[in-house]
């Protein structure tokens, strides 16, 4: 299994898109942190945790990384070679999930470090508090949730093998669909994947009251576990030609 994971990491590293998305993610998160600080009214100073929680905005990129990493195999038919080298399909999918989970974790850590560095600088310049007791658990939760999105992306791409369709579906669900549902029925949003993940990283939303961090972690982990199990079962039974 370790060799399979290493092989997946090598394949991911050989893909220029992996490096591009990994580089853009921290910049995107820093931009969000800057907006939060700069656009806050003078009489409503942003809490440090609200600024640093913007690191979780990297989820968009880890999700896409996971999708592209798996759907690319089907698009270029390299999945057939992978299954020829390792006839047991289960370990191949598990290795892909583990590899992109690690990549997602690294991207999430880089995004968190960049966001905190930028946030500390901005808050200090404005003479605002730069730290609070709720920052560490929020950062840890955000990093884990962001990494979880990469695993989610791999599993989603197994179920929806078309690269374009998988990315479109992910954008529809996690960028617009969940928020629209939350706007319609605020009581449902905390139980959706995006709402649960936001709770883990203390990333608030104005239209709904989120679950506690531990509750969000359980719900989001449940979503990831379910789609991973389904993806493995589908892979074992589906014709790849």
Image (cartoon, rainbow, N blue to C red):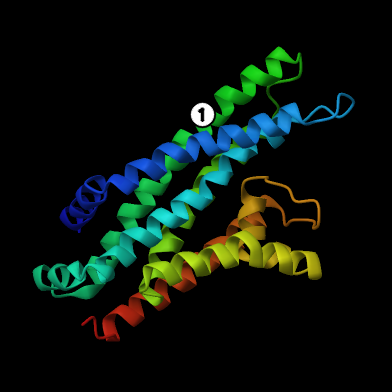
Q: Residue furthest front?
A: 164
Q: Residue furthest left?
A: 85
| Above or below, comparing residue 77 to residue 200 in the picture | below
| Mark 1 element type | helix
Q: Crowding near pointer 1: few (<14 within 10 Å), some, many (20+)?
A: many
Question: Splitting the image into 4 quarters, where does residue 71 fall?
Answer: bottom left
| Above or below, comparing residue 52 to residue 91 in the picture | above
Can residue 185 be spotted in the picture? no
Give the percent coordinates (x, y) of residue 120. 63, 21
| Nearer to us in this view, 129 or 172 | 172
Residue ID at (18%, 53%): 7
Q: Quarter of the image containing the C terminus? A: bottom left
Give the percent coordinates (x, y) of residue 128. 76, 18
Can residue 160 be spotted in the picture? yes
| Side of 80 where 235 appears, left or right | right
| Side of 228 where 127 appears, left or right | right
Q: Which residue is mark 1?
A: 114
Q: Quarter of the image containing the N terminus? A: bottom left
| Nearer to us in this view, 233 or 63 | 63
| Nearer to us in this view, 168 or 206 | 168
Residue ID at (48%, 56%): 149
């Amino acid at each position: 299994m370790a060799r399979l994971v290493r092989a997946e990491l090598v394949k991911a590293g050989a893909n220029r898109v992996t490096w591009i998305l990994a580089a853009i993610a921290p910049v995107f998160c820093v931009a969000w942190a800057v907006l939060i600080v700069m656009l806050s009214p003078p009489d409503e100073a942003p809490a440090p945790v609200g600024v640093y929680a913007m690191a979780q905005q990297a989820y968009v990129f880890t999700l896409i990384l996971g999708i592209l990493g798996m759907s690319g195999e089907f698009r270029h038919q390299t999945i057939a070679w992978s299954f020829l080298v390792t006839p047991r399909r289960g370990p191949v999918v598990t290795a892909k999930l583990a590899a992109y989970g690690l990549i997602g974790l690294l991207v999430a850590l880089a995004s968190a470090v960049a966001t905190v560095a930028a946030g500390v600088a901005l808050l200090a310049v404005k003479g605002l508090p730069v730290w609070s007791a709720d920052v560490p658990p929020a950062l840890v939760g955000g990093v884990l949730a962001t990494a979880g999105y990469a695993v989610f992306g791999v599993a989603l791409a197994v179920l929806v093998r078309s690269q374009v369709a998988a990315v479109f579906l992910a954008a529809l669900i996690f960028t617009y669909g969940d928020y629209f549902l939350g706007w319609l029925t605020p009581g449902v949003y905390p139980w959706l994947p995006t709402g649960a993940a936001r709770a883990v990283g203390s990333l608030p939303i104005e239209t709904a009251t989120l679950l506690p961090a531990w509750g969000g972690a359980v719900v989001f982990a449940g979503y990831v576990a379910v789609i991973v199990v389904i993806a493995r079962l589908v892979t074992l039974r589906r014709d790849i030609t």
